[in-house]
Image (tube, coloured by chain):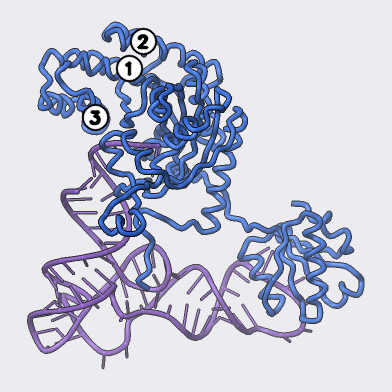
Amino acid sequence: MAVHLAKGTRDFLPPQMRHRLAVMDKVRAVFERYGFEPLGTPAFEREETLTGKYGDEGEKLIYRILKRGEGGREGDTDLALRYDLTVPLARVVAMNQDLRLPFKRWQMAPVWRADRPQRGRFREFYQCDADIVGTTSPLADAECLAVCSDSLTALGFTNYVIHLNDRRILRSMARMAGAHVRETTVLTVVDKLDKIGADAVSAELREAGLDDEGLARLWSILNIPAGHHDTLDKLAEHLDDEGRVGVTVLHEVLDLALAMGVPAERLVVDPTLARGLDYYTGPVFETVVTEPKIGSVSGGGRYDGLIGMFSGQPIPAVGVSLGLERLITVMEELGMVGANTTTADVLVTIHAPEQRAYALKIAATLRVGGIRTELFLEDKKLKAQLKYANARGFRWVAFAGPDEEAAGAVTLKDFVGGVQRTVSLQDAASSIDL
RNA sequence: GUGAGCAUAGCUCAGUUGGUUAGAGCGUCGGAUUGUGGUUCCGAAGGUCGAGGGUUCGAUCCCCUCUGUUCACCCCA
């Protein structure tokens, strides 16, 4: 029994797989409702495609693939598993400059990260992405927020909040705190605010080299309560020119998202939201659910410089990514998962070896009639076959003994009402109402 | 990369202050007369008590190492 899964990976048995597919179907329906088109890319990319895009922390988590042959034995790598779906998209856009812009694509696929697994975190997980390439219009940013909100609503979530900020606001904020301190240091510490509290944040920042004046300026910004335009107005008073550009853009994105139907209480401007990925340049956002505490279920933002890293031609883009397993973990905890049902609706029994040919005919007839039909594959008593049907969650059982066969009929039993009736073979499919 | 906990049947867990045949519930399989499920009853299969080493007359139980796993930090979906 020394058989194990690779760390951070999982099998999905039929009940889980059904649920995953149902979730993906709902999200995909939302993506397509907004006009996003499907895209597929390889599981692995050339190493240099992925490196230098995610920042130091992210880069460490990239799975690299050894070279085939001699180089591999020496530890050389030249390929890497995709870390997200955004960088591969940027590569696709750079390689297909005849794409008509704006290009809107969705993609749902596994990505891999060499992380230490824990609750809601895996080494292989699915991202559900929707991105808009080729426009700087804040309409695109707002649409990503709307898609995110609609997806969560479609899945039945009611307790999520999308936190919105802007990379330029964050940069400006760090600058106001003290130009001599590294921006990322400030943002990393600030990001921990809700976890470790204000005092600990101050202590860490002072340790990082912030003086009292800088700290005071920083806190006057961080203490601005999360909200809507009021938050942005106050932010503008404390930031420099670049920060105010971010503020202006967020005013617009916020208005547009609300106009697109994102509920006001599900969207909030949050000056403390920082995002780690290097490639973001403008608005950034992250969705958290208030009930089970489990990181974020979705994240995204604008990355106007990424595609240019591949093609030299700067092409703006913005996108949102939903984490499938995060969504599912939350849904499971909240009891949002539906009942477990079999794939087929009807089980056709084989009454006795003499009726086997007739049973096959029944199954074939039902299938032609569009009914999802499973045939019992073993030689067992009717009782055992019914037990099987019940245990597996079939709603209907079809059986035919010598009497039915002689009459060209079939008996259909509905487990729900416990009633059964015998109908002609032609009428069988239409007699099953689900 | 850092820290802590856990590891007994397919699953969830008991248990032995170290002592002859390690238990339960659920699940699985079979049975309760002739062509009928869910409930009930009866029965069966299934464990080298994570792996290796040590202490001991004797270890599933104590010690060490390893592996797996969970949770937290970092970071993130």
Which residue in the structure is indicated by mark 1?
A168
Give the letter of the blue chain: A
- Reading the image, the residue beneath label 2 is A245
Q: CA distance from mark 3 to mark 2?
A: 22 Å
Q: Amino acid at mark 1?
A: Arg
- The image shows residue A215 at horizontal and vertical percentages of 16, 17
**Residue A301: image x %, image y %?**
41, 26
Check contact, mark 3 vs mark 2: CB within 8 A. Answer: no
Residues at circles 3 and 1 in contact by the CB criterion of under 8 Å: no
Farthest residue, direction right = A407
Callout 2: helix, strand or loop? helix
Please indicate, yes or no, whether residue A423 appears anywhere in the rendered image.
yes
What colour has chain B?
purple
Q: Is residue A329 visible?
A: no
Q: Does residue A46 sit above or below A227 in this rendering?
A: below
Instruction: Determine crowd level at label 3: few under 14, some 14-19, many 20+ residues with C-alpha closer than 10 A.
Output: some
The N terminus of chain A appears in which quarter of the rendering?
A: bottom left
